[in-house]
Image: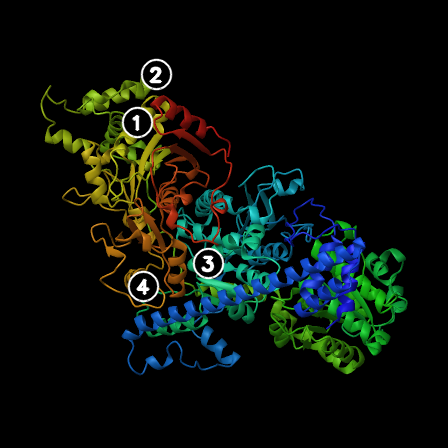
Amino acid sequence: MAGNEWINGYLEAILDSGASAIEEHKPAPAVSVGDNTGFNPTKYFVEEVVTGVDESDLHRTWIKVVATRNTRERSSRLENMCWRIWHLARKKKQLEWEDLHRLAHRKWEREQGRKDVTDDMSEDLSEGEKGDFLGEPVKVDSPRQKFDRNFSNVEVWSDSNKEKKLYIVLISLHGLVRGENMELGRDSDTGGQIKYVVELARALAKMPGVYRVDLFTRQVLSSEVDWNYSEPTEMLTTGPEDADLGESSGAYIVRIPFGPRDKYLRKELLWPHIPEFVDGALAHILNMSKALGEQIGGGKPVWPYVIHGHYADAGDSAALLSGALNVPMVLTGHSLGRNKLEQLLKQGRQSKEDINSTYRIMRRIEAEELSLDAAELVITSTKQEIEEQWGLYDGFDVKLEKVLRARARRGVNCHGRFMPRMAVIPPGMDFSNVEVQEDISEADGDITTLTNEASSPRAVPSIWSEVMRFLTNPHKPMILALSRPDPKKNITTLVKAFGECRPLRELANLTLIMGNRDDIDEMSGGNANVLITVLKLIDKYDLYGQVAFPKHHKQCDVPDIYRLAGKTKGVFINPAFIEPFGLTLIEAAAHGLPMVATQNGGPVDINRALNNGLLVDPHDQQAIADALLKLVSEKNLWQECRRNGLRNIHLFSWPEHCRTYLTRVAACRMRYPQWQTDTPADEHAAEYSLNDSLKDVMDMSLRLSIDGDKTSLNESIDMAAAGDNPEVQDQVKKLLSKMKKPEPGGRESDADRKLTDVPSKYPMLRKRRKLIVLAVDCYDSKGAPEKKMIHLIQEIVKALKLDAQFARHSGFVLSTAMPMSELTEFLKSGNIKLNDFDALICSSGSEVYYPGTYTEEGGKICADPDYASHIEYRWGSDGLKKTIWKLMNTTEGSKPSESSSVIEHDVKSSNSHCLSYVMKDVSKARKVDDMRQKLRMRGLRCHLMYCRNSTRMQVIPLLASRSQALRYLFVRWRLNVANMCVILGETGDTDYEEMISGTHKTLIMKDVVGKGSEELLRTSGSYLRDDIVPGDSPLVAQIKGGATAEEIIDTLKQLFKSPM
């Protein structure tokens, strides 16, 4: 470790940089497109001291300065800065201590969760079966045994599936996505993931049995980016050439508009707009499913075979889409939020709050947790990603996953517990354009020979000349490193290893392809730091003429760079501290380059498959130099590694990847909408009965006369609802003439009552063009609905009555946390009939009713059975009942107590898909995100919320909610969410935030809801409301609670005119 002189040197350098003082060290803001943040020397030197110096050295230096100070200003400033740097070092240690404490607590919670699962599930096992449960040693199988077991009952995807004609949906939201001339490296959001998803879409479309692949991304209309990104659709490929495919076949990029239309947003700012994307994507999928059904489905919709989300934002979207459509979901994380959070906390430079503010890391982690909840399958690149990265998440436990899988195979009850399956499928590569010289022994690395292969200088790739101009002797083997100048890529250690190994310097050259740059001062801080260090090391070791570091290269130059290294019998190296996968290693192997790579992460699996190089400890500078020297100097070893790589590279081809992918997806539990799709179209009036026609008129009139002044149907009909169209008025009169009028002053006859309440085969929703959804959560301190809800319903209907055209095509839905029985009694108390509503969403979205439809023989209304099966996914009520009672009535370190229970089961409000509890002591209630974490650790997936002024806690299926119920109405009855308006209060139940964002319109009524339940939603340190609700949206309007009917209808009409 360096002594005090080294420290003083850095402090002097800080003074020389011109900084008058050092402020408290804060993280640099994320750089967006067009950001010209300059390199800060002061920050660079401070970070070097904080990360590289022991506190005792800093303290001794400070004491020395104090003891020898004089009147000169320079010494005074030196003392001041030394003190500040010492403070930063102490702060770093404090953050490290907090991090260790947090990890220890999390480990304890994980063990507690496993213990609870063991207690709950071991009851079903015999004594012989209990031996292989949690905590017991697990037998380790060989790779061959694992392969045989995993695929013993699975048919590998082959040409026999050619007749399937599948529709696959991929989602990758952030960055700039296009099929040609990808701008990889333009910013941190447009990187390897973009290339991966585009090539995956192309490759899947060429597989037998796949008819169409849609890659969803964001439509960007900003002048900052190319116009291509504003195109709604871009065709990637037409599919297999030998297949008999239709007009809609092939792979396509589909760009869905969401968020600000004229701005390109970095991924951290997209979160509040995710629901808007979900609604737009849902509309496209429904239209495409119908079109494909007409082409290849025999008239029946062709639902997506799978919805595959890439990264956290797309995973969140895929979870909501799969729930709305009831189709399987697959997830690829690419890089994970918890892993990034752990790495940033270990650096000790930023607090958790600072990290969350910069990266929205807690919102990202929650999206990844939701993705794990919903995913049937999680695809990873390496085994390390499963154990060391996904293992950090509440929703995945390697041990518990193995136990649940074993129980499922034996047919033993898992009590509603689920874990997603993890599958290692390495990314594919397109090797069609790779040119490999089979035998280069004769060339022997002679640059003159390879440049003379070209008939003219123009035929030599320009990047070759750009690299070779740095080198005194370009004939020597090239050690090639290709990565961004990111500190994690460990380029500086590579340069040190090269500079300090004289035999290596004499035998080889070093080429560093470190992205593109124009001016170091314009680079982001971390990248600039690395580049400056590299330049200083080149100067320190006098490596001029031995190291090439070109400023620019194009994506199309990369194959030529690999080819140049191969021609010189060079070696490719990836010395990163941790490499999640290592796609460049595969690219290099495809061009015949042996590799030296980090032993941490994906390269382990790659080298096991290819056997084409050596693995090293990235922290061991000498090991890196020895491995490079070994491959460069031992020609037989170099040839063997080259041959092995070329022989086995097919394992990483796109066809191989897609074959394994489709095989894995086929093994998932397939599900899709189960209802019949024979609902008659609106224009075919002959296909529905007179009762339906009568109900159209009566329904409209009923809803326009809830003011209570008129008691009979005929008296309440307002002919203004028919407008000025004589034909419409005549139709109304003809229908009314068929109805027997009640005697004046007499009671409504039984026949009239039957006609009014006559059940219809299909809900009226199927013919509505707009939908007004009232979801105002008005409850008193005991959780009872307030009477002003009745007045609010009447005022809204009165407002609709003011516009005949609006009223004719608008439906009315009530969305509430109340069960159907309680809601019926409440509406009856206000003289409001159930048939006045097109639909009722009850028990926080666990049930949907259509008054006048789905009734029993006794006239009792029934819940939609299709919706019940739609939300059944991963619903484990048995396991949830026991676990929730235990968690809510237990504090850390104590046992559950019946006498001091916080909750009481509310049997009256519960149903088959809703567990309702009365809160006996709200002050002891756990927050929603805390409960969600603990349930996930126990393998239980659900949607938990507090409602009715915090007097109830309700637990419903994972993908059920009041907002998801609206999407179900869209899927089931084709009533577009964009044509809905949700009316809310200023606060509400803990699912309130979910109801605001999306393509629907939102009308917030002020001063209507006195108190909601949102204070029980999040713990401190969780994601923020701004990560869920967009700050400024043209789709959201506000109005005072006491607004008149005229003000309400004017606001509604303005909202429906708002541009999307």
Marking on residue 890: 4
Residue type beneath disc 1: Glu
Q: Distance of mark 2 from mark 3, alpha carbons?
A: 55 Å
10 Å neighbourhood of mark 2: few (<14), some, or many (≥20)? few
Q: Which residue is mark 2?
A: 724
Q: Which residue is mark 3?
A: 369
Which of label 3 and label 4 is nearer to you?
4
10 Å neighbourhood of mark 3: few (<14), some, or many (≥20)? many
Residue type beneath disc 3: Glu
Pointer 3 or 4: first along the chain? 3
Residue 195 vertical position relative to residue 703 in the rendered view, above or below: below
Pointer 1 or 4: first along the chain? 1
Residue type beneath disc 2: Asp
Q: Secondary structure at mark 4?
A: loop
Q: Which residue is mark 1?
A: 795
Residue 289 in view, yes or no? yes
* Residue at horizontal 37 percent and vertical 45 percent from the top: 968
Marking on residue 237: none
